[in-house]
Structure formats: C-alpha cells, structure tokens
Image: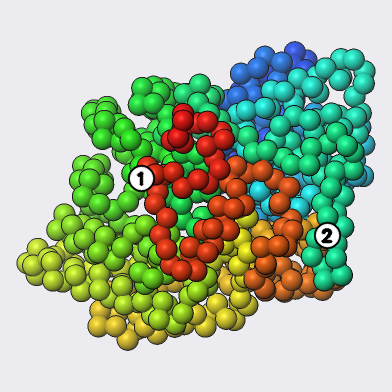
Amino acid sequence: MRKLALPDDVLLKVDKAARYIGNEVNSIVKNPAKVDVRIAMCFPDVYEIGMSHLGIQILYEMFNSRPDVWCERVYSPWPDLHKVMKEQGIGLFGLESQEPVRKFDFMGITLQYEMCYTNMLGLIDLAGLPLYAKERTDDMPLVVVGGPCTYSPEPIAPFIDFFYIGDGETVYDRVIDLYKEMKALGTYSRKAFLREVCHIPGIYVPSLYEVTYNSDKTICSFEPIFDDVPAKIRRQVVTDLDRAPYPEKPVVPHVRAIQDRSVIEVMRGCIRGCRFCQAGMTYRPNRERSLETVEKYALAQLKATGYEEISLSSLSTSDYSRLPELIDFLIDHCGKNHVNISLPSLRIDAFSLDVMSKVQDIRKSSLTFAAEAGSQRLRDVINKGITKEDILAGSEAAFEGGWNRVKLYFMLGLPTETEEDRRAIGELADGIAALYYDTVPKEKRTGRVNINVSTSFFVPKPFTPFQWYRMFSPSEYLTRAKCVNDTIKSSLNHKSITYNWHDGDISVLEGIFALGDRRVAPAIKYAYEHGALFDAWNDFFQPERWTEAFAATGVDTDFYVGRIKPFSEILPWDFIDCGISRKFLEGEWERAMSASVTRNCREGCSGCGCASYSAGICPGH
C-alpha cells in the first residue's frame, strides 16, 4: 500500500485534504522500477483549477502512453499547506506515487497566466531546487515550461532550463528520447543536455543566449552564444488533430473542479483575427477535428468518467463547420443518458439561440455577448467583427425565446479609446434593457431583465497587432471605469443593469510580465521570497508587495508598460517565430488606427504567414 506524502496530522489541518492524496478514478500508476523517465507535470494553481485544464490532461495521456515514461500530476498547494511544507521541510510530491519531485527527471510546468509566476517559483522552491537555473546540479530534475506564457518567456527565463514553444503534442518524444540516449551512453550532464536539446524545433534554452542593452534601456542585441544554436525558435503546430493524442479516460477529481464535466476540443485556432487576442493569433492556423473523432471521444469520456455534463472546447465553437451535425448527435445521445450539454464560445445568432434553447434550461442560463467595445468605431479598431445591429438582433431573438439574463463583456484602455467610447458601453447596456421591455409583453415577462456588464482592462500581448501599445496607471483605469458606472447609473433602465470591473493593479502587473524582459526576473524572485503567492486571487494579491519588489530590484515598470513602442525597437520576444509575420502585425496596427476591418480566414486569406504550416484552413492545404 502506497504511503501518503503528508502525515495525518497535516491532512487533518489543511483545507480540502483530498486535493493532495491522489488515487483518483483513471489516474495512472506505474512501477517506478520499470520506467526510464519520470515527469512531474505541474500546474501552478490550486487543484480545482488545474484539474480543469485540458492541456494537462492531453500531455498526461500522451506521456503515459509510453511504457518507458511515467507522468504524474502536481498542483500548487493552497497557502495553508505551502506554509506547513516550508516549515516542516516536506518536499513537493507527485500525486500518483506521493514521491518527491526532486527524484524525477523532468519538472514540467504549464503557464497559462502571467499572474501565476510566483506560484511557479513556489513549486520550484518546494521541490528543493534553487530558483535560478544556473545554480542547479546534474542530479536535479530539468525544469521545462510550456503554455501561452512561453510567447513572452524572458521575465522568467533565468528560472527555467528550457521552454517548449507551441503545441505540446509535436516534439516532446524527441526530447525524452534524447535524454534517455544521453543517460544510456553516460554522456548526460545538465549542461550537455541543454546544449543538445536546443537543436530540437520549438525548444528555447535561455542560458544559450546573450542580451545587451542600449543606454535608453531598450534591447541592443539578442544573440545565441554559439554558432550552432538557432537564432530563431519556431513555434510547433499540430497539423492533424485527428491523429494527435487525446484523453479517452480523463482523471476524475476528488474535489469538485471549476469545470466538473467532460471536455471535448473540437478545433484549435480561430478564424476571427481580433487584434487584442493573443490566443487568436498564436493558435493559428484554424484546425478542426473531424465529426467522427469528436463523437468517438465524447462517447469514450462519458463512459469512462460518469460525468453528467459535456462541454465543447474551442476559441469560437460557432465556427466549427460540423456543429449542426455534432449538436444533433449530442442531443440524441446525451438526452437519453441525462447528460447536460455546455456550449461556451458561441456567437449569438439565430442558429446558436436555437441550439441553446434545445440544450439549456432557459430559466437558469444567461447569454453572453463579448462585445469588447461599446462603440462601433472601437469595435472596428479591434477587428471584433460584430456590429450593434448583431448584438441587438441577438438580444431581441433571445428575449423572444425566453431569456431575460444577459452578460456583456468589454475592455477599457484599448488603443484610440475616447470618453465617447466608454459612455457607449453604458448606452449599449441601456439599449438592450429597453429592448427587453419593448419586445416582451408585460404578461409574458418572468421578471425584470438582468443585464450584467463587466469590464476588464486591456493588456497588450506579444504577437498581436497591439503589442506596441501602452498601458495606464491603476488610478486612470478606475477613472475610466467610473465613467462607465456614471453612464449606467444615469440611464433610464439602470435598475436592470449591474456593473463590475477588474482590478487595475493586477492588470498592470500582468502587462509588466507580458511585455517585460530578463531584467524583471529579480523582482519576481524578490516578491516570492517576501510572501507573494496566488497573485491571481484577489484575496491574496497585495500590490504594495510588488511596488516594494520593483523598487528593491531597480525595475522601471513604466519603461515596459507606460509608452507606445516604435516598430524599430527590438522586442523581448522577437527571437520567436510564431508563424505570424511582423509585416502582417504592423499592417494590422495601421489598419486599427484607421478603424479598418480585416476579413476572417474563411472569407479570404489575409496573409498572416501561418500558411507556412500547411495545415487547417490555410490556402494550399
């Protein structure tokens, strides 16, 4: 019988001890003596969020399909347990074996969100490894990071042995095979392995590059220190999703996860080209799974998990070309088995509303419009591809269909934004509320319409047309939110509208991490060592801790987020070939400044550069 890593007295004291005991349904346990490579797949957030992450499930399936590899899962201990582990010297452990991560060969960390950087350091620290990669020895696991944050890796580069940039299903086998070969030949050392692994496409080894700076703090050069180290790192892309690994038996959590359901990815990438959206750019080209493959995984997961809900995953599910047939299949199968169907990321049109009316309880559900901007001019600036008429027509159809709850999502601080644009948010919400009372006869209303308006603050991200743009101070963001709030309060239907906005301090910090370079790393280390943890959670985030960290380490935050950068400036991520050409991004910036709309990928190729992958929707494939 396996021994738990945490003693009983600790498990009895911490919140939700079931997070740490493993042995869930469909978890994979192997004999450590019969595998050659052990991987700790780490998610730097709490168990309930990490267990909802599809990428971890895919990699867990892929790695464990190899008989010579055992991949285990690791999630950030909640602050109560983190404190106990530090005080009692309890090392970070894999859930499946309950053995220390320090014994493993690889410590893989997926980074979905910049605000998890201190949690990432927390995992490395609890594993008993030095925070800086250069201080680690040959007997320690190699720390590798993947996920969306690898498109701006420099702020955390000093902590990481190597990054994997792109879809994880492509070249990890080559990384593992290289490691095994060097171990078998007796040629392995950390330094020697990193010197070799950099030749595998998509692998970035920070220690093999040198950065120099100009007197104005901008980057002067970013160059490999050896001639055979690639100057550009090419993002890796799965070209055939039907042949890519996917979990048929996902692990079922002990504790109710944020997404407590079966999740089926129907496609990857997006055709829309919103200029603010990093995922929409960096997951190009748009690639679909076949209807037959999606149906196969849906049936297999429901059988293996007993879930009572299934969700379709993509950036824009409405754009999946086989959606009508898939919905018919799911309604037929799920209805007989009392399984609910969840359809996120739908555009609100007549078809989507018809589908939702079939699969949702209208009395309990709400509709979501991600309008992003209040005015049509600003929606054209960001290339949102939705008009006021679209929003009102969708709302009217929804009200006629029985819905009376609408969620509206917007961003503040977008390029070219004016006070008129901000006021347009409240005016649009008021117009939708008024439409309800005009559309639905009094005797058919189920109560007052509920319009929930939410604004976040725009954060420029690498490999988007807005990567050169600036951010504003938290106080300026609050002023902009107040403008929206005042407009809503003065509207005719204000009693039907609620408004909330995100934290400005968190948004600015996210921007510093997204746009920063290696000189930001000491501040992240300082903040962690002075108590920063779970910064993505409002209950734990303390902005003054970061103010102190930046001051103590001499980081000029305004340099990274307080200015519009010229096209000529070398950006910290320019060494990555993401498939999106610089010419395209610059052109999209210029089109944004003139509020010109770019057609979506189905309407015609815009020449972004991703046709070079010869996959999915791109011409010639």
* Of callouts 2 and 1, the N-terminal one: 2
Give residue 484's position: percent from left, percent from top: 42, 79
What's the colour scheme?
A: rainbow
Q: Is residue 466 above or below residue 210?
A: below
Residue at x 57% of width, y 55% of height: 585
Give residue 298's position: percent from left, percent from top: 38, 27
On the rendered structure, is 173 left or right of 101?
Answer: left
Residue at x 52% of width, y 83% of height: 479
Label ID, residue 220: 2
- Could you tell me the amino acid type at mark 2? Cys
Q: Nearer the viewer, residue 421 or 110?
A: 421
Residue 539 at least partly seen = no
Residue at x 50% of width, y 21% of height: 243
- Could you tell me the amino acid type at mark 1? Glu
Residue linked to disc 1: 603
Residue at x 80% of width, y 60% of height: 219
Pick the quarter of the image with the N terminus: top right
Q: Nearer the viewer, residue 10 or 244?
A: 244
Residue 226 at least partly seen = yes
Q: Nearer the viewer, residue 556 or 3?
A: 556
